[in-house]
Amino acid sequence: MAARRAPNKSINTQLQKGRKSTQRERLLTGMVAATNKGGYTAATVSEVIAHAGVSRPTFYDYFADRDECFVACAQEVRSRLAAEVRRAVQERAPEDALAGAIETLVAFAVAEPAQARFLMREVLAGTAAALDVRDQGITEIAQLIDRVSGRAPTEQSLPDLPVAVAIGAVQRLIGSRLRRGERALGTMLEDLLGWSQSYARPTRAHRWHTLSATGTIAPSPFLPATPARAPVRLGPGRPRLPEDEVAENHRGRIMFATAQAIAERGYAAATIADITKLAGVDGRAFYRLFVDKQEAFDAVYERGLQQTLASAAHAYFAVDGWPQRIWEVLRVMTQSAQANPVGAHLGLLAAYAVSPAAAQRVDDSRTAFTIFLQEGYRHEQTISEPSALTLEAIAGGVFEIFYRDAREHASSDTAGLLPHVAYLCLTPFMGPKKTELFIDEKLSGKRNRRVQRGAASPTRAPAGSRGRDTARTT
């Protein structure tokens, strides 16, 4: 492998070297410092100018508001990282393009931890424009890798997985570790390269490189028969119900309204007035049940997470065989996300904007998912023993798929992504060929098995299911 080129000196390094910086550069540096210190919500104009050492009028000479500065900072770091990745990938053999990009991501994080943390983690809490910067940067890197690796011979073995998902997963892992204060990131590289290489197969046999919905997946018997709804509004006048029942009715309506308001307007823009109007209650009812908007969001998030985990665990233990168990867990997850896009939006997007603690819960739920992968080590078809970091990378890839799908809710067909997500999870343990055979058998119905332990037959298809062909599975 060609020697890695060190990243360009960042704004912070240039300041340390004594190079006279512009005031704009100082403001961008201040935004990175303020955001990394307290998260997006704490990165106010006052905090930014305090870190930058400039006046408030100077800030407004360059930026209209905090969000414009935040997006500009994301663009600056993204451009610098993209230049490093481009240089590294173009110097590599076609078959090493993805490996070169992963090496560069790790090297950038080692050399510029503040900049890397901002782009790879803290940007997730920003506005839609900031998320666009993050996602477009990943897409550009993926397109570069595809152009370079496309020059490889058809018999050359290359990772058969969506490159943007792989890059997004690596960034999630790096960002989480930087937020925890870890600095020995170079130790991740070998495991990350091993993870990506576990999907390698001749390019002529590639099938999973492009992320797309595949067929109509039969509804999981472990989903609720009907989608959750807000409680019915109570009639006018004083309700003839016990006080605790009235409070529970109001609580349920407020929680559903909180989810709807945040999904429609974003966490920062949604107000308690918006929530109470949607819920059909007054402010007094809200404050009797919740301290503030964040506590209402926390209640919504925790209920959704617990319901999903309970359904996934039920599905996991209801069938025999580890690959089959993973399939059933992922069927619940993909169909739950499609049936409840508002909940998926809150859990994968809005939570980062609420608070650092809420963002940490997203990381914790990603770690919890790896528990379902642990049994893979004992599976008889295991061809290798993936590292613990590989399990984290798999989970990061799964969350990246769901995240991207949640951002594209207008065209979402999440349930149809089940084969792709299953391939991502199973391949590092079983290898590409055996994993593909298992998935094809599931799709063709050759491995039909009666789900045990009294699972009821579903009465509906997941909401929004469209399907592009007639393939079915149980």
Image: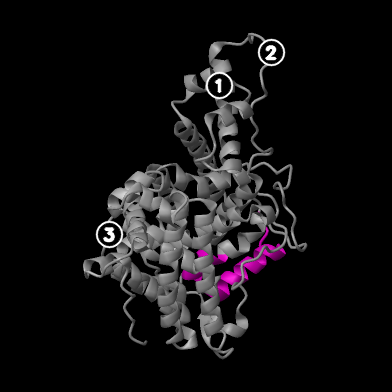
In the image, what residue type sits under mark 3?
Glu
**Which portion, as a residue range, is magenta?**
423-449
> Is 2 rendered above or below residue 261?
below
Name the mark nearer the viewer: 3 or 1. Answer: 3
Q: Along the polypeptide, which appears first: circle 3 or circle 1?
A: 3
- Please tell me which residue is depicted at 50% across the width and 67% down the height of the picture: 137
Give the percent coordinates (x, y) of residue 160. Answer: 55, 75
Assign a secondary structure to mark 3. loop
In the visual, does 474 lie left or right of 71?
right
Q: Is residue 230 left or right of residue 299?
A: right
Specify the label residue 236 is tagged with: 2
Q: Nearer the viewer, residue 45 or 114?
A: 45
Classify residue 356 by image quadrant: top left
Q: Give the main secondary structure, helix, strand or loop, of the magenta stretch.
A: helix
Q: Tell me which corner region of the image, top left, top right, bottom left or bottom right, holds residue 248.
A: top right
Q: Residue furthest right?
A: 470
* Quarter that holds the N terminus: bottom left
For the point 63% across and 23% down, which residue is it? Answer: 280
Please name the residue that numbered disc 1 is placed on: 248
Q: Secondary structure at mark 2?
A: loop
Q: Nearer the viewer, residue 181 or 305?
A: 181
Residue topped by disc 3: 182
Name the residue rendered at 48%, 64% in the picture: 168
Measuring from the top left, give residue 461's x and y in whole percent: 73, 47
Label 1 or label 2, whichever comes before in sequence order: 2
Q: Are marks 3 and 1 in contact (CB under 8 Å)?
A: no
